[in-house]
Amino acid sequence: MENLELQKTANEIRKGIVTAVHAAKAGHPGGSLSATEAFTYLYFEEMNIDPKDPKKADRDRFVLSKGHTAPGLYSTLANRGFFPVEDLKTLRQIGSHLQGHPCIQHTPGIDMSSGSLGQGISTAVGMALSAKLSNDSYRVYTLLGDGEIQEGQVWEASMFAGHRKLDNLVVIVDNNGLQIDGRIEDVCSPYPIADKFRAFNFHVVEVADGNDFDQLRAAFQEARDTKGMPTAIVMKTVKGKGVSYMENQAGWHGKAPNDEQYAQAMEELEKAGEALCQK
């Protein structure tokens, strides 16, 4: 897809995120919105997937290690055709297939249940190793939060991935700088993130603006071209991106907008969509 089409799709995905969290009166909009371009690029450009055959054997795998940002993944899957966009309004409701964290048993397109922070990358590493052992061609992608990488299990998994030279694995770190308790550098600084992954034998791509499709395209191409070691894409993003009052506000890590805030967010996203249509 051209960048303009990707931008339009990302804007629709943002509408879905805000709509889902508002309807649920709970959820995590901030980190869903910061990773929207990454979700969009993965599912509309990068990965070998088929909404009509979600379990096809040679599909690329995605693990949402920061599982609390499920609204972002769900809105992406819905817009990609895995299930109706209308389902987003049932987020976290009794009987809905859209639980608060991704569940492989209930939702089409989910490759791994996740949400216990630190564990998603471990399962992604296992998937990548399985592909190597079976001589399968699929690639494995996993998205981590920058607060999540304070978990020790992340580095155990990284050590293993680097040791086994899993060049079919791409670890994406959403470096929006904020976690539930505030700035990551104040809570428990993981910096320098890139140097840490390099020390674990990763090829590292640092993306200055992870909300820019040109930069994401170059990063994922570099990951594909890298042989003999896994790749970590460390991307700087804006938490709450696309909704003015949520941007760079730690308070919107895990909070739903009220009716007035929802109306404002949707008005902003509608205007952003109209501006893209005029390009």
Image (cartoon, rainbow, N blue to C red):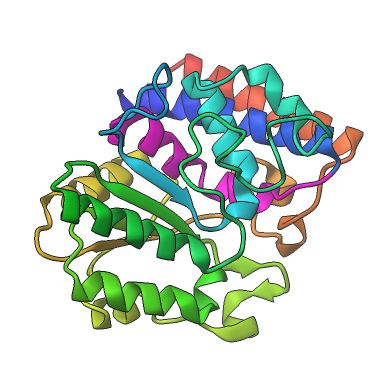
Q: Nearer the viewer, residue 271 or 239?
A: 239
Magenta highlight on residue 31: yes
Quarter of the figure that contains the C terminus: top left
Dominant secondary-structure state across the stretch colored magenta: helix
The magenta region covers 26-48
**Magenta region includes residue 232:** no
In the displayed structure image, the side of residue 143 where residue 159 appears, left or right: left
Residue at point 76% right, 39% down?
21
Image point (71%, 58%), residue name: 253
Can you say which quadrant of the picture contains the N terminus? top left
Residue 173 visible within the image:
no
| Camera-side residue of 50 and 9 | 50
Is residue 228 shown above or below 221?
below
Against 237, is 274 above or below?
above
Relative to 268, does residue 190 appear above or below in the rendering?
below
Q: Position of residue 79 (x, y in %)?
A: 53, 22
Q: As drawn, is 87 to the left or to the right of 235?
A: right
